[in-house]
Image: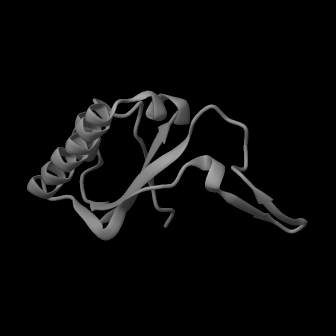
Amino acid sequence: MTRYYLLIPHIEAEWRAKTPAEQVAVFAVHEEFAELLAKRGHTILTGYGAALTEPSTAVTVRASGLTEGPYTEAAEHIAGLYVVDSEDLVDLAECCKVLARAESAIEIRAKEE
């Protein structure tokens, strides 16, 4: 079994521009995705399917001190993540296509052994 981290980037302004109904539709796709993972034998670790707060609320810690706001001035920031245990990366990637309908992209990374 391999542990995968599914990172979900987005552009903050695009999320803010969505209507409440559009935001609800995105969350519905996340529910569909979670159900599909369970049906196909992938395990979302409890408490690890999470939306993150906006990048403007981030605090970055460096040896030189604290900085408020995100680390970089990138257009895209990580909006959320899932931690999934799976034996089949190819099928996991296929499942992620469902989530990609509502999100700009899904980045899958394995935990380093």
Q: Nearer the viewer, residue 20 or 106?
A: 20
Find the residue positioned furthest to the bottom. 46
Residue 76 lies, with reference to residue 62, above or below; the image says: above
Q: How is the image coloured?
A: one colour
Considering the image in quadrants, where does the N terminus appear? bottom left
Q: Quadrant of residue 94?
A: top left
Find the residue positioned furthest to the left. 39
Q: Position of residue 25 (x, y in %)?
A: 23, 36
Q: How many marks?
A: 0
Q: Position of residue 10 (x, y in %)?
A: 49, 36
> Could you tell me which residue is drawn at 46 percent across and 62 percent down?
111
Q: Position of residue 24 (x, y in %)?
A: 26, 40
> Could you tell me which residue is drawn at 26 percent across and 44 percent down?
27
Q: Is residue 39 left or right of residue 102?
A: left
Find the residue positioned furthest to the right. 64
> Could you tell me which residue is drawn at 14 percent across and 58 percent down?
38
Q: Is residue 13 left or right of residue 47?
A: right
Q: Quadrant of residue 58?
A: bottom right
> Could you tell me which residue is drawn at 30 percent across and 68 percent down?
45
Q: Is residue 12 left or right of residue 48?
A: right
Residue 19 lies, with reference to residue 66, above or below; the image says: above
Q: Is residue 8 visible?
A: yes
Q: Nearer the viewer, residue 44 or 19?
A: 19
Find the residue positioned furthest to the front. 20
Q: Position of residue 36 (x, y in %)?
A: 14, 48
